[in-house]
Amino acid sequence: MNKQSTYSYLFWDEHMNQSMLKYVMIPFVMSLALSMNMKAQQRTYVMKTIGMHDDEVLGVFVNGDNTRFATSSLDESIKLWSIPEGKELLTIKGHLGHVNNISFSGDDKLIASASTDRTVRVWDVQTGTQQYVLTGHTAEVIGVYFSPKNDYIASTSFDRTVKLWDTKLRTEVKTLRGHTDKTNDVAYSYDGKYIASCSDDRTIKIWSTDLNTKEELMTLTGHDTQVLTVLYSFDSKRLASADEKGVVKIWEMPSGTLLRTINAHNEIVQSVSWAEDNKTVVTGSLDKYVKLWNSDTGENLMSMDVGSDIWGVDLTSSGDRILVGCADGSVKMLSETKAAIKGKEMPKVKGGKK
Amino acid sequence: MRYNKHVMFMIVFLVIAQYICHAQQVMSVTGTVIDQTTRNPVSILVSFYDRNNKKIGSSKSNSATGYYLVTGLKQGETYKVQLESSDFFKDQYDITLPVSKKYADVSRDFTVKPLVKGAKILLEVPPFELKKSKLRVGAEDYLADIKKMLVLNPGVSVEIHTFPDAEGDPAANEAFTMERAQAIKQYLIDNGVREQKLGVKASGQTDLVNPPPRYKTAKGKRYIGPSYIVIIKV
């Protein structure tokens, strides 16, 4: 039963407590509430805690072929997990501070991680060994993202910059300046043409990946508080952003037109992700809820209380599994129930997802 | 051949003349001096010394604005700037002036710490990460200022006072904040501060002056229990 249904039930229970009528009305109200609930909840999932970090889980990232996902934590480690088993495969240590975010390379062979130790580090997925360290940010690094062709890594820091690193030269090649406050997240478009960054200055900036262009191409305004995360859809035609008030915005790209504003959560939304259909968006919030949205209509497809504040969320291409990283250190896997999957056309898995 | 020699001589002459001309360009340094704890302007003697420790110029900052001006300085030179007052910790900084083709003002503001028993100096950038008791990467940059203050003012004794990130079991919090205080103390000892000058005080409860917010904050921006340097003896 969703929250509204529960409140409806409690209202009736309180007001009809002294009446025999409640024995008649309560089943009626409950069946009505359940039917409303079923209508809203178009996709249903079962949740399982598959493992724990030693401290809060800050980042979650599913690899391109949907066989693994990585989590990063306040405990300074990165863990790799299998999909769909949810088995812990590897723990990677080496950062000297919290690991705020992670990103798989397009070929799934490497992971880049962003840390409060002011570095971006790159790790071999098979062995967990550190490949190289990228230093240059002057404050903690909060966001990181591999380019679709693996040739660059973009990172954001509280030093207000976005930096691009050449993965072959293993050096910084471009610094993008323009945000007037802390930058919180960064994402490449999957066509490789653009980078989006978001900031405490309440804006989203779109940058060219051309190394000779240092000025932003566009600034998207509309959020009325700090923008915490951004992510392009797989076809690069949409951008999702989320802010401190729990508002999610969907932008048409590359025009930058605002398509939709969704009052998604009651608390900070630190993480969003797209399914491969380019319209389903998952959001995770400090209000403890993970939610699925149809970005075409703004319709809520699923809403689930996971019992802990959510810092990171991602999903497989088809959306049949949602991976959640929680403030209590737990890593949860939400699996779509078979009844819901039956009869639904599943999209093909796309390689090099992220 | 003779013509070429003349041209060469002229070029060398011009280069030397330009160098001498630039070297003689006078520069000024201006700015304000404020109290680090109250953020109010202060009156303090600002003196510039050259590399031979010869006093080149000095100025007393204005008590209402904190403004000071020292002139007669040479471009490209490095100066030791000393700040002195009976009410504040003696402090010093190195300034290297840029090379410029014309007269120029260089701006430099300073903060000073009050030399008052009981004064609490907040470490404005927390030297720890959330829930961690080891010094964070880069904490040395911020603690270097405290180290310098104690080395330059050998008669002063301080207490390192640390607070937890959140309310919880007071005993566990106190053990945790003691680790934090000890980490700062050890850094200072390792960097030349006498152990006898350093005390520690760990709190089991969050700071009443600077308490944790009641709302949730985003990744990387969460409340970290403050650390203070409290002046015990001046």
Image (cartoon, coloured by chain):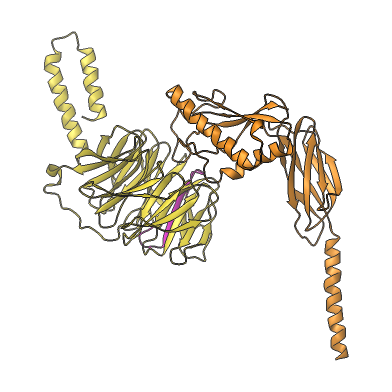
On whether residue B187 falls in the magenta region, the answer is no
Q: How many marks?
A: 0
| Closer-to-camera residue (A214/A65) | A65
| Closer-to-camera residue (B7/A317) | B7
Instruction: Output the letter for the chain in yellow.
Output: A
Q: Which quarter of the figure has residue B148?
A: top right
Rendered location of residue B47, percent (x, y): 82, 43
On screen, residue B93 versus residue B58, left or right, reads left
Q: Relative to B10, is B156 above or below?
A: above
Instruction: Output the letter for the chain in orange.
Output: B
On whether residue A203 falls in the magenta region, the answer is yes
| Closer-to-camera residue (A334/A278) | A334
Residue sitting at x 11%, y 47%: A342
Residue sitting at x 26%, y 27%: A4
Mark yes or no: residue A256 visible: no
**Which residues, given as a range, are shown in magenta?**
A186-204
Mark yes or no: residue B63 visible: yes
Residue sitting at x 18%, y 36%: A39
| Residue most extreme to the bottom | B1
On screen, residue B17 versus residue A297, left or right, reads right
| Closer-to-camera residue (B72/A233) | B72
